[in-house]
Image (tube, grey):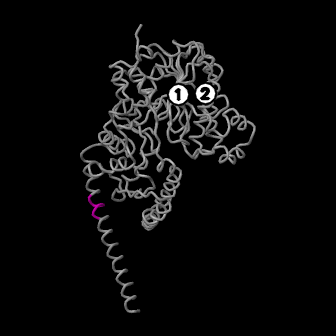
C-alpha cells in the first residue's frame, strides 16, 4: 500500500463543497492531476441560466484545466455532481444523494462560503454557519469517513491582532447554537436589524459568520476526524497549473486592476501594515496535505482532540507590506499595460480617512463627471460616476483590513511541511518563506491582464498598450503642469490684490 499524500488519495471518494469557487476549482484540478482519486462528488447548483451540467462543461475551455485535460483527457469523468445549495435548511440534497454520500464518501472538503463582506446577516449565516453545521451532521452519517477539512479564513478571529492556530469562542457575543436558533425563530428583517449587536467587534458579516462556523465545529464535531484550514487573502496562482491564473475581481486584485485601468487613483490604506496575501495553488496544496495529516491523526487517536488549525499566511522572514504590494502592482505598468486604460496608471495612498474622502472628490468624482459628460455628448451611456460610487463603497467596507496589521502563527502548517517527504514538498509546495514576491507579482499581473482583462499576451497587444501608455503619460504630466500654472496664476492674482489693498 502506497504511503504519503498521493497514496492516501488513491482510489478515495471525495465530497467537495464550494467546487465552483476560486479555490474549489484549483483543488479539483490538483486532485485530478496529481492523485489517482477514484471519484469527486461536487455539490453544485444551477446559476445564471446554466444548469449543473452546463456549468461543469464550461470548465473544459478554462485555462485552469488545460494542462490537466492534455495529460488526462478523461479526468472529468471522475467528477460527479450532487445538486445542492447552502442557502437551504437541508442543503437541498435529495435523500437518494444523501444515502449515496453516506455509503461512499471517505474525505470531505467543505469550502462553500459567501465571501461578500456586506452580505445581509441572514444570508451569511445560512451559507457560512448553518451549512457548516449541516455538513458536520451529514459527515456523521458517512460510514467510511477518514478526514473532514473545514476551509475557514485567517481573519475569522480578526478582533485580535496576534492570532494563534487555535479556536477563540470567547470573542463571540453569543454562541453559534444561540445565533442559529434565533435565525430559525426570527424574521430575516429582524435578524438583519440585530447585526451590529451580534457582530460586536467583528468588522463585517463574513468574518463573523466564519467565526461562528468554527464555533459550530468546536461544539458539534465530536469525534469526527476534522481539521480547519485558515488561508489569508487568496490571490492568483504562483506556478500551478499555470502561473498567474485568476478568475475574480475580489480583494486586492480589484485594487490593482482599477489602478491598471487608470480608474483608481487614490486609496485609503496604511502603507506600513502587512498585506497578507497567499497564492491559490499554495492554498490547494495545504488543503490536500492537511486532510492527509488529519486522517493520520485519526488512526493514532481513537477519539480526536480539538480540531487542529492550519494557517497559511506570509512569514515574518518574507513579509509583504501594503507599500510593497502597491509598488509591485504599479511597477509593471510600463512593461505590459492594458489596452483599455482610460488614464495613466498611478495611485496615491492616504492614511487619514477624511483626507481620503477630500482627495477622492478631486481624483475620482470630479473627473468622473467630466468623463460622463463627454460620454453623454457623444451619445454613449455615462458610467464612471456609478463606478466610483461602487469603488468608494467597497473602500469603506475594506477599511479595517487596509489600516490594521495582524500577526498569524503558522506553527502547525510549518510542522505539516516537515512531516512531508522531499518529493511531497515539491509536488504540494506551499512554503511562503521561499516566495519571490517580485516574480510572483509579475506573473499575477500578466494573469490579470490575460484572464480578467481578456487581453492576449501577444507582442502586438503589448505594443498597443505601450503606445496608449505613453500618450496617457504625456497627457497626465501635461495636465499637471497646466494645473500648476493655473494655481500659480491664482496665487499671484491673490497676492497682487493683497499688495494693492495694503
Which residue is more in the foreground, 134 or 336?
134
Name the mark on residue 220.
none
Q: Quadrant of the C terminus?
A: bottom left
Image side of residue 149 versus residue 219, left or right: left
Determine if residue 333 is in view: yes
Q: Tell me if label 2 and label 1 are in contact, CB under 8 Å.
A: yes
Instruction: Name the residue: 40% across, 44% down.
Output: 452
In magenta stretch: residue 55 = no
Q: Quadrant of residue 85?
A: top right
Q: Quadrant of residue 242?
A: top left
**Which residue is label 1 attached to?**
228
**Which residue is label 2 attached to?**
217
Which residue is more in the foreground, 276 or 266?
276
| Residue found at the far top of this picture | 1
Which residue is more in the foreground, 404 or 370?
404
Q: Quadrant of residue 105?
A: top right
Which residue is more in the foreground, 71 or 314?
314
The local secondary structure at tag 1 comes to: strand
* Residue segment shown in magenta: 470-474
Main secondary structure of the magenta stretch: helix
Rendered view: 192 above or below 436:
below
Q: Which x, y percent locates residue 350? A: 43, 58
Amino acid at each position: 500500500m502506497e504511503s504519503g499524500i498521493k497514496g492516501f488519495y488513491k482510489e478515495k471518494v471525495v465530497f467537495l463543497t464550494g467546487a465552483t469557487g476560486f479555490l474549489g476549482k484549483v483543488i479539483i484540478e490538483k486532485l485530478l492531476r496529481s492523485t489517482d482519486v477514484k471519484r469527486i462528488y461536487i455539490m453544485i447548483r444551477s446559476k445564471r441560466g446554466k444548469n449543473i451540467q452546463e456549468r461543469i462543461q464550461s470548465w473544459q475551455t478554462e485555462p485552469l484545466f488545460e494542462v490537466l485535460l492534455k495529460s488526462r483527457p478523461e479526468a472529468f469523468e471522475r467528477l460527479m455532481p450532487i445538486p445542492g445549495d447552502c442557502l437551504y435548511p437541508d442543503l437541498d440534497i435529495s435523500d437518494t444523494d444523501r444515502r449515496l454520500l453516506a455509503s461512499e464518501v471517505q474525505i470531505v472538503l467543505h469550502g462553500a462560503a459567501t465571501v461578500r463582506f456586506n452580505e445581509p446577516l441572514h444570508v451569511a449565516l445560512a451559507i457560512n454557519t448553518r451549512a457548516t453545521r449541516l455538513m458536520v451532521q451529514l459527515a456523521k452519517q458517512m460510514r467510511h469517513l477518514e478526514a473532514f477539512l473545514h476551509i475557514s479564513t485567517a481573519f475569522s478571529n480578526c478582533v485580535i491582532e496576534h492570532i494563534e492556530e487555535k479556536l477563540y469562542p470567547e470573542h463571540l457575543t453569543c454562541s453559534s447554537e444561540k445565533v442559529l436558533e434565533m435565525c430559525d425563530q426570527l424574521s430575516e428583517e429582524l435578524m438583519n436589524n440585530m447585526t451590529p449587536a451580534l457582530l460586536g467587534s467583528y468588522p463585517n458579516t463574513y468574518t463573523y459568520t466564519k467565526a461562528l462556523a468554527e464555533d459550530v465545529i468546536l461544539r458539534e464535531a465530536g469525534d469526527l476526524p476534522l481539521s480547519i484550514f485558515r488561508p489569508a487573502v487568496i490571490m492568483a496562482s504562483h506556478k500551478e497549473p499555470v502561473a498567474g491564473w485568476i478568475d475574480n475581481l475580489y480583494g486586492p486584485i480589484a485594487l490593482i486592476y482599477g489602478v491598471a485601468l487608470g480608474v483608481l487613483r487614490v486609496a485609503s490604506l496604511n502603507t506600513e501594515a502587512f498585506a497578507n496575501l497567499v497564492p491559490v495553488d499554495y492554498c490547494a496544496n495545504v488543503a490536500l496535505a492537511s486532510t492527509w495529516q488529519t486522517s493520520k491523526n485519526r488512526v493514532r487517536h481513537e477519539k480526536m482532540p480539538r480540531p487542529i488549525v492550519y494557517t497559511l499566511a506570509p512569514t515574518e522572514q518574507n513579509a509583504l507590506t501594503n507599500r510593497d504590494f502597491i509598488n509591485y502592482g504599479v511597477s509593471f505598468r510600463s512593461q505590459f499595460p492594458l489596452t483599455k486604460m482610460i488614464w495613466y496608471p498611478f495611485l496615491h495612498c492616504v492614511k487619514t480617512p477624511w483626507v481620503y474622502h477630500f482627495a477622492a472628490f478631486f481624483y475620482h468624482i470630479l473627473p468622473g463627471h467630466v468623463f460622463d459628460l463627454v460620454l453623454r455628448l457623444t451619445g454613449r451611456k455615462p458610467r464612471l460616476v456609478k463606478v466610483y460610487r461602487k469603488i468608494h463603497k467597497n473602500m469603506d467596507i475594506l477599511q479595517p483590513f487596509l489600516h490594521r496589521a495582524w500577526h498569524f502563527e503558522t506553527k502547525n502548517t510549518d510542522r505539516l511541511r516537515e512531516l512531508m517527504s522531499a518529493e511531497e514538498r515539491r509536488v504540494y509546495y506551499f512554503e511562503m518563506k521561499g516566495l519571490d514576491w517580485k516574480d510572483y507579482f509579475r506573473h499575477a499581473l500578466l494573469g490579470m491582464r490575460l484572464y480578467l482583462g481578456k487581453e492576449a499576451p501577444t507582442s502586438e497587444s503589448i505594443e498597443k498598450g505601450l503606445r496608449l501608455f505613453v500618450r496617457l503619460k504625456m497627457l497626465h504630466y501635461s495636465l499637471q503642469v497646466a494645473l500648476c500654472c493655473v494655481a500659480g496664476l491664482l496665487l499671484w492674482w491673490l497676492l497682487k490684490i493683497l499688495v494693492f489693498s495694503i
